Structures are given as structure tokens and as C-alpha cells.
Image (cartoon, rainbow, N blue to C red):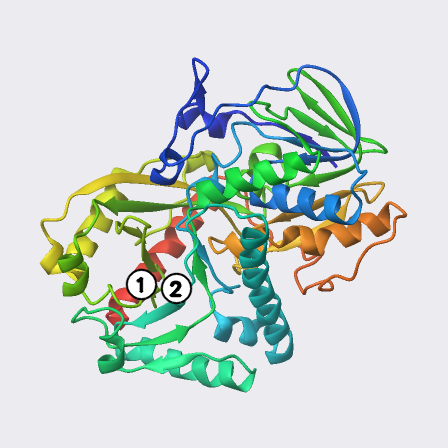
Amino acid sequence: MHLRLDERPFSTVPPAVANGAYQPVSFWQETVDVTPGVPLAEDLDCDVVIAGGGYTGLSVAYHLKQQKPDLDIVILERSVVGHGASGRNGGFAMPLIGWDLYHAASALGEETAGAAYRLMYQAVDHLKQVVAEHQIACDLEATGYILINTCTAREKRARRELELAHRLGFDHTWLDRDALQDYIRCDQYRSGVLDPHPCIINPAKLARGLKAVVEGMGVRIYEQTSINEIVDGAPVQVRTPGGIVRGTQAVLALNGFSGALGFMKSRILPVHTYIVLTEPLSDAQLEAIGWAKHRASLETARNFIHYFRLTADNRIAFGGEDAELYPGGSFRNEDPGIFEALKARFRQYFPTLRDLQFTHAWGGTLGVSVDMFPTFGQGGSAKNIFHACAYAGHGVSLSNYAGAILAPEMLRAAGHNAEAHPGKPFFYNRIPFWLPPDPLRYLGMRGYRALLRAHDRIQGA
């Protein structure tokens, strides 16, 4: 494995730091004070070098330090911790893996799907525990989550999935139209399925809080440090403009940015999703749409979902509607067409809020495999390079649990004792399906998106 950086995908986004000051993209990033950390400026030797300072890299560092505090761990981050998806996502910590539980059972079998979802619920609980234990001020709310049906076809599928969930021992609840009115009011919402366990967070506050936690454990983090090259071997060499880091082990915690470094470029798509944010709602406005009582996080049952939730100051973050792959795998923070489509859909759902102003709009890059399943694993000529990525837009809980899965494998591989761990999930050492290079990949993705949109229209979703 020999990886080299391709700078071209980054040419379509502005730098995270300009004239020494951090340049936030999302609303969440505006709620944290960020002093950009110094870049690497020397050669280093360490036990573990981690490429990427998002939730995955922070989680792996955290769990390694918990089990073996004397490990020397270095995290390298191109921009600042929490600038990528970890500081821009919708803030939903939920157990979703694959398209949904029904899809997972169809693809994997009920036993494997049930085990995967139980692991995901452990991931949700783990996040809550870490936040509580370290008193991370990230606006965590245990709101639960409702999948909303807007058409007959989706109701039928939701009924089948609910039966499956109960068969596997999960405590989901059916909400008919009247029951759903107690959570959210919209004429187009026919029914829903309530999962009481998910929570919401301010993602940027969580990322910066985790950064402080792992630094307090002795982890060295270098921000503003681009990785130019990773050279396989023992040790692994990670080359940056300011120096080379030689690690006994390495972790690729890059998710949607993996392809820019050449890792699984033909297997993980850098797909983009977008969010618009309203001004704060008054108590009367919240009451008018029935959201004041439970504050549940919400998602519509469509191919191109809509996901929405309340912020701590009662704004509505409304995302989804479309997902875009850009030519050449380039990265984009904005897509005006999708922003306008989101605003139109919001007003369609909530006509009483048609005069509500939108204050923010942003987007970011996801790592997505064809079948929507993630990939964790171990590789390299010396089997000392580990990875976790392809969360498909539902990675808040799993990426924060990545260390619980990878750390024991890494410690054992290095000859250390390791604590008990959740076991290797089905996606450990799973290689996602191969995709052709551009322009075929880009054109194929556009055709696939057109089919998904047509399916939504036909169903009336």
C-alpha cells in the first residue's frame, strides 16, 4: 500500500485557515472557539500515527490510550479537528446501518443484521457515556428518532421492518397518524416508527470536546498538516510538508476524503449532502407544528431522505433532499440548487412557517459504498495499517465507536494485551464493491440518482 495525495479535489473548497484564523463552514462550527493548532514541523517516531482528526481518529486514540496509556500516539489533521463531516453533520447519533434494518436483513440475513444493529445500539450508548463521563458540553439531547412515512408504499415497508425489529428484540413503536400528531404536525405525514434510543448533539462541540479529552490523555495532535504520502512498511511512513512521522502502526481515519489520498478510491464515493438552518422558532411556532413537547429527531422514509431536528436554541436544521457526487471526486461546501430545493420542501411540509428566515446553509462530504455498508479493517504488507470509513451519512455513533472495535485488534497485532471488545462486525475486512473510474463513475452515479428520484416520485414519497 503506497498512497499519494491528489490535491485537485480540494481546489473547489476554500482553506479552513486563512491568515491564521479559522474559517467555519457550518452553523455548528460557529458555536465553538477554534485556535488552529500548529502544523507538524519535524520528523517524529511514534507507536501509532492516525491520518485524520475527525470522530474516527479521536475515538481510536481515546480507546488505545484507555487500554495502554503509555502509547505514543500522533494525529495528523489537514485542517482543524471538526472541520470535515465531524463538524458539519446533522448531529444524529442513531443505529442505522445500510439503507435500513429491512435492507440489512435482506442482504446479510436476520442473524447478522440483528448483531449489527445491536452493535450500533451499543455505539449510541457508548457516545452518551463518553459525553457524560468527560462532561463534554455538546448539547446532547436524548430525543429518540422517528422515521416518518408519507405514502402508502413506505407505510407497508415500515410495517414489515417493524415486525422484523420486534422479531429481533428491538423496542420500536408504531405511531399512527393521530399518535404522530403528538410529536410533529404535518398533513403529509401519515405515520411513523419511533426508536426511543437515539440522541442529538452539536457535532462541532463534540469534536472539539473529544480533542481536549484525548490531548489530556497525552495524544499529540498536529492541525494544518496535509498528508502528502503514506509509505507502507514497518514502520509506516507518513510524509507531510513539515516532516515525516514513522509509526509502528497507522490508522486511516479519512472517510469521504479517502479517495483523495488514493485509499479505496474505486470503492468509496465522496458523496455530498446539504443542510439549511432556520432562525430560532418562538414557543408559539414550535407549538403550532407540535414539536415543542417531545423534540424528537425526524427523518422521512424516502430514497432521498429529509432529516431534521431542533438545535439547542430552537432552530430547525433541515437536510437531505438530494445527494451529489461531483466530477473528479471534487469536494463542495455549497450547492445553491439543493439549498433552494431544501427550502421549498421545508415550506411544503410546514406552510405555517413559510415566513421563517433561513440563516445558514452548508454541506460536506460523506464516504459511501455502493451497498451503504461501512468498512473497517487491517492491511498493509506488515498488517499494521488499519482503517474505518464509508459511514454513508449515519456515522456519528459508529465513528465514535470505531476505537472500541479497532483498538483491541491493534493492540493484539502489536503484541499487547487488550480488553474485551465487541467482536469483529460483519464489515471488518469487508472490501466494498468496485466502481469504474471517472467519467463512468460520475455518469453512473447520476443515472442511479435519477432512478432513485423517479422511484420517490412514483411512490408519492
Density class for disc 1 (Cα within 10 Å; few <14, some 14-19, many ≥20) is many
* Quadrant of residue 286 within the rendered picture: bottom left
> Which residue is at the front of the view, 447 or 412?
412
> Which residue is at the front of the view, 388 or 269?
388
Residue at the image position 26 percent from the left and 52 percent from the top: 314
Measured as percent of width and height from the top left, residue 343 is found at: 20, 49
Q: Quick check: 23 above or below 440?
A: above
Q: Is residue 440 visible?
A: no
**Residue 455 placement, left or right of 270:** left
Q: Is residue 178 visible?
A: yes
Residue at the image position 24 percent from the left and 64 percent from the top: 291
**Residue 131 placement, left or right of 242:** left
Secondary structure beneath label 1: loop
Measured as percent of width and height from the top left, residue 14 is found at: 40, 24
Q: Amino acid at mark 1?
A: Arg
The numbered mark at residue 143 is: 2
Secondary structure beneath label 2: loop
* Quadrant of residue 121 within the rendered picture: bottom right
Give the quadrant of the N terminus: top right
Q: Quick check: 250 above or below 237?
A: below
The numbered mark at residue 104 is: none
Callouts 1 and 2 close, C-beta under 8 Å: yes
Residue at the image position 82 percent from the left and 48 percent from the top: 411
Density class for disc 2 (Cα within 10 Å; few <14, some 14-19, many ≥20) is many
Q: Earlier in the sequence, mark 1 or mark 2?
A: 2
Residue at the image position 86 percent from the left and 45 percent from the top: 414
Measured as percent of width and height from the top left, residue 23 is found at: 39, 25
Q: CA distance from mark 1 to mark 2?
A: 6 Å
Q: Quick check: 317 above or below 70?
A: below
Q: Quick check: 454 above or below 257?
A: below
Q: Which residue is mark 1?
A: 295
